[in-house]
Amino acid sequence: MSDLRIRPIRSIPVSNRRRVTFDVPITEVVQGYNLRFEVQISGSAMYSLLSDWYRQLVQNINFNASSSLRTTVGRLKTGSGISFINESTLLRGVSPYLWSDVDFNDYYTFPRQVIFDIPIDFESLHTQNRRMSLLNTRELSSAQFTIDMNDINELSANPAMPSTGMDMDGVIEVYAREFIDDQAKALQYSLSRRDLIEQAVSSSNQNMQIDLRRGFVTRGILVHAFNRESMAIIPNDQIIRSITLNVNREIKHSMTWDALKNINKNDYGITCPAGTAYLDLIADGQLDGLVNTALFQDVSLTLDVNGGATNVIQLYPSELIMPGL
């Protein structure tokens, strides 16, 4: 039995619209990191805020690493804060920690404190060997987070009515979930990678093609459909009507958007967040459904979409970098 410990490794100040960059220790085998944001929000009133504004305080997260053993290692994790929260909610079947000393629907009481977690996972959830993709930091020469905070004044459901004079400051408490025993350190792991492909959807199209980058093994794709208003993301389940995964121009998976969300609910036991679904290539924990994109000339999605001036689709392929690549 491996010994798992959770320990604090960094405390980083953050504020409104600020970018922070920090290294993480290179010592143990990491199951994942928990980013706990403890922020104080001040001002007079927030107008027409998004219903999930507190989940969009983090604009973007990047985790970069370099390895002497695998030259393809670089940007291992990337995405908006809300995309990491939604993916964790689906695959773990429970929403990450969230707390405030004031009701989230109260837009007039200030100052207020908000605390929320964003998990950054490396383990392979819903597989028979969840530990096959742990991050052995001892093979890395560097490992670094870059985090961009949003402007709380821009998180409005009505772009014509942004808030003004709002401010935010606080800290990120960074925790590492680590296996510290010699047995875990002696094993060789695949590396868990999360890519980002973004596509504007300005016009309706029954056959919109999005190519997936090739070179790694794909285990699933988080699909996020939304309207972008300034810095705000407004989830929208009406943008995608159907989704098809093609491998060498042969259909591997094909279903309506509603069907995919229902499959997710049955598989993970939780209703999909708005505008979000996960195309999982793992069946009953088995790995035979994975797609090694390096072996095929064409790996793509075909989407039937409704267009709109602010419609956007983001794809987050979950990939494995196998040993030796």
Image: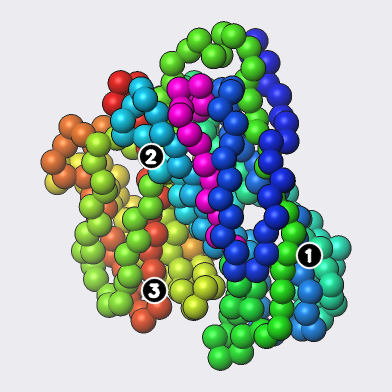
Quadrant of image for the C terminus: top left
Answer whether labels 1 and 2 touch (C-beta < 8 Å): no
Q: Secondary structure at mark 1?
A: strand
Q: Quadrant of residue 101?
A: bottom right
The kind of secondary structure element at disc 2 is: loop
Of 281 and 194, the residue lying toward us? 194
Asked whether residue 4 is in view, the answer is yes
Q: Position of residue 249 (x, y in %)?
A: 14, 46
Residue for badge 2: 74
The structure residue drawn at horizontal position 35% and vertical position 61%, both measured from the top left corner, is: 198
Residue under the point 47% across and 54% down: 79
Side of 169 relative to 268 (left or right): right
Estimate the x, y position of residue 49 in percent, counting from the top left: 66, 78
Residue 237 image position (x, y, % from top left): 46, 67
Q: Which residue is mark 3?
A: 311
Which residue in the structure is indicated by mark 1?
40
- N-term-proximal mark, 1 vs 2: 1
Can I make out residue 92 in this image?
A: no
